[in-house]
Image (spheres, grey):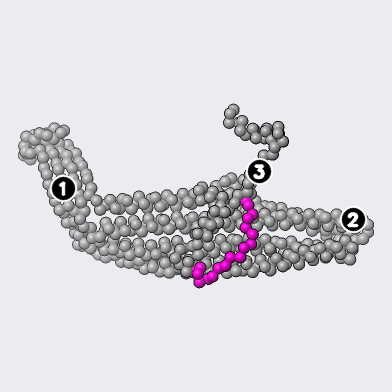
Amino acid sequence: MNNLLPRFALPLLALLFGATVAEAEPLTLGQCLSEVLAKNPKMAVAHAGHEEKRATLRAAQKDLLPSLSADYSYQRESSGAAIMSRVPENYYNYGVTVSQPLFRGGALVNTMRISELDLERAESTTVQTRNDLVLATEKAYFSLLKQQKLAEESRQAVVRLEKHLADAKNYYEAGLIPKNDLLTSELELAQGRQDLVRAQNQAKLAATSLNILMRQPADQEVQVADAFAYTPKPVEWTALLAQARTQRPELRQADIDTQRAAKEVNLAQAEYFPSITLSATYEKQGDNPGADSNPYGTTEIKSAQAVATWKFWAWGQSRDRVAAAERRQIKARETAALVQDDVVLQLREAYLNLEETRQNIGVTEKAITQADENYRINESRYQAQVATSTDLLDAQTLLVKAKTNYWNAVYDYNIASATVDWASGATEVSDARFAQ
């Protein structure tokens, strides 16, 4: 019961005192990014992969350290066999062994180096995941704003068409226009209402995309703050390309893969060398569970040994493994070149899209002014019955198209700007937007 009180307290107070309950503030881009980076499973997967590689590295580092093992055994011998082998009938044995690997042909060191590279790659993958989510969020955010603007333009178009239809009915009843003009006005209004429904659904779909990124219910209503007016962004191709080559995580990952492949060649070559291990063992043996009594000899055995093992013939298996590792090194090197080409292409496409949308904004701004004036003139002429419904409806179509092109250009510019940041690896730019 106590949990229900806060839910009804504010509305009740509002009714008693005439207060209004404040609506939720629209989400800023920074707030959306915070939600996405905190809740999206892709970040959790990236962090888990990073911690996995960190644990693997710790395990590889500990392979270089001494290891401690213990064993305990019990053996029952027949009396005759026990006398012959000089052991008790009930033979208990336990021991502790310390082993230290001295040489593995570089296998242990190279395994550790590979694990270090895997950890570094996981860190780079986390950065890439973050950058990808930032771009996806910015695209969803600006797409939602764009679709909301387009839906509003469709609503205003319906209002204009409804007003025109009312005028057309009056003129038709006065015998000033033929019925065909009235029917045309009705058909245009019906089409306008269909366009409005379609635009509203597109806005809902854009909201769904943002909700999914933020791990919210798909149908939850979301309001975003429209604080991003058109601000020209100076960009220079050479600077962007240089930045991408040093900051894109994909290039760093390709470089790490090349280094890792080289270490794998060294790891495969370790089979050409012997392995040497130093160990020390302390044992106790006897005729009781504590092994502190042995009628046939000593109860304690202490030993130390160095063991060298060299597998010098296995039908060329080691050579084949080295050859396979060398081919993987070639693949990694060539793949790195392909990744670099992809990065350059992605950046070039983003750069050209930014320039295109920047130029489109200037063109569409002028088109809106011209379309507004054209509609005003045709509306006045129609009121004076010196223009037809077709003239006014054509002017209406041009006005809607001009405004649609303008909002597409404005928000596509913001999306293109975010894509340039992503393609150049400019995470500091995304961080600046994150703070908004």
Horizontal side, residue 244 vs residue 436: left or right: left
Point out the image quarter for the C terminus.
bottom right
Residue at numbered disc 3? 23
Per the image, label 3 sits on a secondary structure element best described as loop
Provide the residue span drawn in magenta: 224-241
* Between discs 1 and 2, the one toward the N terminus: 2
**Amino acid on which the number 1 mark rests in the picture:** Ala
* Type of secondary structure dominating the magenta stretch: loop
Q: Nearer the viewer, residue 136 or 183?
A: 136
Name of the residue lying farthest toward the bottom: 238
Q: Position of residue 359 (x, y in %)?
A: 64, 69
Q: Position of residue 297 (x, y in %)?
A: 6, 38
Residue at numbered disc 1? 280
Name of the residue lying farthest toward the right: 175
Q: Is residue 383 magenta?
A: no
Task: Tell us which disc is closer to us: 2 or 3.
Answer: 3
**Amino acid on which the number 2 mark rests in the picture:** Asn
Residue at numbered disc 2? 170
Horizontal side, residue 263 vs residue 86: left or right: right
Does the CB distance between marks 1 and 2 fall below 8 Å?
A: no
Q: Quadrant of residue 232?
A: bottom right
